[in-house]
């Protein structure tokens, strides 16, 4: 279900690396990823995550006013929820925001798991400073379907990366969260090497409020043999991540030719 809401502001200051502002056209996210911690970031109290989406229908109007007075800076589009989730097909709020950002020549960084971004390639390629990040947590689409049921398939995301890159736009892969004992890091790096992103950001599983219950329910349902291992991880054991980083470190240089950056 989608509900139209009225936002009071558009650009908010961002503490994320490389970003000055955050811009989020939607509250709630139809991708419904198992490991999502956005509900704790926005203090979501409106039922099951993924069931209700709030579309900020007046956002372009507010953004238009703010862009006239704000100091120029990098805008992260979709820092909390995906700007190209299904609701965007109907509302086109992300697209209208991009038109305004282009008009004011603001640098933009977009992160998504949706192939709907290709709809806006005509706009994206006109920016003087814009980059697109695509999240990939696995090379295996059957795992992707369980982890990120509402998002585009692995193949569709690879297609997005290659199309965007063909159009001269800088791309990166957000490899996160790497799911312990589930993400086949070597295979994923091999998959990423086919699309040659400019860089790869790597993140671990973040144990924010709500994530533990969601992930442990997911493991019990689909991978019960990993229950014990995940109990350790969900209670804070992080050694698994060091091994993952070693594997990524080796593959990044040799297979992809791109650098990897740890996400903080
Ligand atoms: S795409 Fe991001 S915001 Fe949306 S459900 Fe997945 S992790 Fe959460």
Image: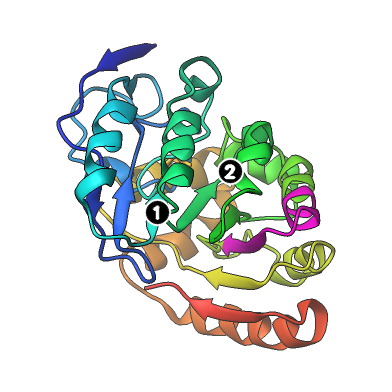
Tell me, yes or no, whether the two marked residues, 1 and 2, touch with CB atoms within 8 Å: no
Q: Specify start and end residues of the magenta stretch as a single range.
A: 161-174
Q: Earlier in the sequence, mark 1 or mark 2?
A: 1
Within the magenta stretch, is there residue 169? yes
Within the magenta stretch, is there residue 192? no
Quadrant of res 130:
bottom right
Mark 1 or mark 2, whichever is nearer to me:
1
Dividing the image into four equal quarters, which quarter contains ligand 1? Answer: top left
Location of residue 183 with respect to 68 vertically, above or below: below
Residue occupying image coordinates x 51% and y 51%: 111
Q: Which residue is label 1 attached to?
A: 76
Residue extending farthest to the right is 194
Label 2 residue SS = loop
Residue occupying image coordinates x 50% and y 31%: 95
Depth check, front residue: 150 or 170: 170
Residue occupying image coordinates x 33% and y 62%: 73
Depth check, front residue: 185 or 222: 185
Q: Is mark 2 within 8 Å of ligand 1?
A: yes
Residue 23 makes an appearance in the image: yes
Q: Is mark 1 within 8 Å of ligand 1?
A: no
Location of residue 26 with respect to 231 vertically, above or below: above
- The answer to whether residue 49 is left or right of residue 161 is left
Residue occupying image coordinates x 47% and y 27%: 30
Which scheme is used to colour this image of the protein? rainbow
Q: How many numbered marks appear? A: 2
Q: Which residue is label 2 attached to?
A: 113
Residue extending farthest to the left is 8
In space, the residues marked 1 and 2 are separated at their CA atoms by: 15 Å
Location of residue 259 with respect to 20 vertically, above or below: below
Label 1 residue SS = strand
Disc 1 crowd, CA 10 A, few/some/many (<14, 14-19, 20+): many
């Amino acid at each position: 279900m989608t509900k139209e809401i009225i936002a009071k502001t558009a650009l908010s200051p961002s503490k994320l690396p490389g970003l000055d502002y955050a811009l989020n056209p939607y509250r709630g996210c139809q991708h419904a990823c198992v490991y999502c911690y956005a509900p704790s970031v926005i203090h979501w109290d409106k039922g099951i995550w993924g069931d209700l989406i709030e579309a900020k229908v007046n956002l372009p109007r507010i953004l238009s006013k703010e862009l006239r007075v704000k100091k120029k800076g990098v805008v992260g589009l979709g820092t909390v929820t995906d700007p190209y989730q299904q609701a965007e097909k109907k509302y086109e709020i992300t697209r209208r925001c991009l038109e305004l950002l282009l008009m004011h020549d603001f640098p933009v960084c977009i992160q998504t798991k949706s192939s709907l971004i290709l709809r806006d390639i005509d706009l994206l390629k006109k920016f003087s400073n814009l980059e697109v990040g695509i999240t990939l947590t696995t090379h295996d689409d059957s795992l992707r379907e369980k982890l990120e049921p509402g998002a585009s398939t692995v193949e569709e995301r690879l297609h997005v990366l290659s199309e965007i890159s063909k159009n001269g736009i800088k791309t990166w892969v957000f490899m996160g969260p790497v799911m312990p004992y589930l993400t086949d890091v070597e295979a994923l790096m091999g998959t990423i090497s086919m699309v040659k992103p400019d860089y790869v950001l790597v993140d671990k599983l973040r144990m924010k409020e709500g994530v533990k219950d969601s992930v442990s329910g997911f493991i019990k349902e689909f991978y019960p043999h990993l229950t014990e291992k995940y109990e350790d991880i969900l209670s804070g054991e992080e050694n698994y991540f060091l091994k993952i980083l070693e594997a990524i470190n080796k593959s990044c240089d040799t297979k992809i030719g791109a650098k990897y950056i740890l996400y903080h």
